[in-house]
Amino acid sequence: MEQKSGVFVAMDTHKETIAVAVAEPGRSGEVRFLGEIPNRADAVRRLIETLASKYGKLSVCYEAGPCGDSLHRQITELGQECLVVAPSLIPVRSGDRVKTDRRDALTLARLHRAGELTAVWVPDAAHEAMRDLVRARTAAMETVRRARQQLQSFLLRHNRIFTGRSPWTAAHRRWLANQRFEHPAQQIVLQELIDTVADAETRRDRLNGQIEELARSWALRPVVEALQAMRGVAFLSAVVLVAEIGDFRRFANPRQLMAYLGLVPSEQSSGRKVPREGITKAGNTRARRVLVEGAWSYRWPARVTNEIRARLEGLPQAVRAIAWKAQTRLCARYRRLAATGKNRNVVITAIAREMAAFAWAIARDVQPAGAA
């Protein structure tokens, strides 16, 4: 990657401090450690202004982490280039057993100058806010799952087994309300667990409503609506995909999106042997989970249900054509792979991988220019 900056600045960010190193251009350029500054906006501004007055154009980088993207936005607003680096893709020497903030900053500066770092996509403030809301809803769903599991485990320990068709239906909840224990302590535990499940479900539903309301004014709403043309992708699934992936156009081809989602097989080749193993599971877990869940709907023959027909209203003909092509291909592919005796989970993963390709095609067709 060609670098046009006058000097390369690396920041090893932490909660309270930032370690700073500078690498001058050229293979023989000096790489030196400047020291640490407080992780505050005013300190960062003074550092960037001082370095800019001395070197001119800067190219700054730091690792993606829990401190978020505010540092990237501040440096960009100051007129300097800033890269947020993927930590998992930073080259590491196997023999290096000493790790300090100073060494990390110097190593980042050298690698940045050499063009060996991989930048991650940084969303704008509005997109990040929507993504935070979607992730809060995902966390709420996990809380519901844990609360339900704790309640069912408690009942199973006392041989209270629901014999109905499926749990968490109206019949199951009536059965829970009729459970009685001899000891008051156990009755209290049961009621507390039931209340915990109810509170978690209320929080989840509240977040669902907030997402539906705020998505109406979201710049990427056309992409959310278009993705719902696909079978297995309802409103909340489409919102998760768009919030987590962001700009679909940053992927030059669907294979790049598949690799980003960790849906491609891992490989350990040596010589003429090319052994392939399970998927890499790299990249975005939340988007991959949504696709895998949606892939189960392709077990049945291809058809446009009333629910899908309602979602197709008002969508461009090109989007409808892609969605129908996806449905006919993936339903047939599921039957063909299942008929060969492949493991059911392997088949579903293969369907999810192709779903990502069709989602890429739909999103690139409708994504507004400049959005995300």
Image (cartoon, rainbow, N blue to C red):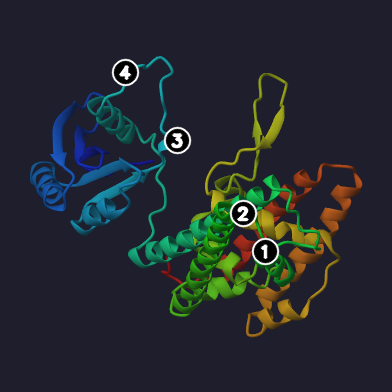
Q: Amino acid at mark 2?
A: Leu
- Secondary element at image label 2: helix
**Where does the image place residue 60, in percent across and percent down from the top left?**
25, 44
The earlier-in-sequence mark between 1 and 3 is 3
Q: In which image quadrant can residue 296 be found?
A: bottom right
Q: Is residue 129 left or right of residue 173?
A: left
Q: Quadrant of residue 5?
A: top left
Mark closest to the chain's N terminus, 4 or 1 = 4
Circle 4: residue type: Val
Q: Earlier in the sequence, mark 4 or mark 3?
A: 3
Q: Amino acid at mark 1?
A: Leu
Cβ–Cβ under 8 Å for marks 4 and 3: no
Marks 2/4: CA–CA distance: 47 Å
Of the two numbered discs 2 and 4 on the same chain, state the one appearing first in sequence.
Answer: 4
Which mark is drawn over residue 89?
3
Residue 245 visible? The answer is no
According to the image, label 1 marks what residue?
A: 176
Q: Is residue 243 visible?
A: yes
- Circle 4 Cα neighbour tier, 10 Å, few/some/many (<14 / 14–19 / ≥20): few
Residue 11, given in percent of the width and then of the height, sits at 24, 38
Q: Are marks 1 and 2 in contact (CB under 8 Å)?
A: yes
Q: Please tell me which residue is depicted at 13% across the width and 51% down the height of the picture.
A: 45
Q: Nearer the viewer, mark 1 or mark 3?
A: 1
Q: Position of residue 286 (x, y in %)?
A: 55, 53
Viewport quadrant of the N terminus: top left
Task: Assess disc 3: are there few (<14), some (14-19) or many (≥20) residues with their C-alpha within 10 Å of its C-alpha.
Answer: few
The tag earlier along the polypeptide, 2 or 3, is 3
Return the residue at label 4.
Answer: 98
**Circle number at residue 151:** 2
SS under mark 4: loop
* Type of amino acid under label 3: Leu
Alpha carbon distance from label 4 to label 3:
19 Å
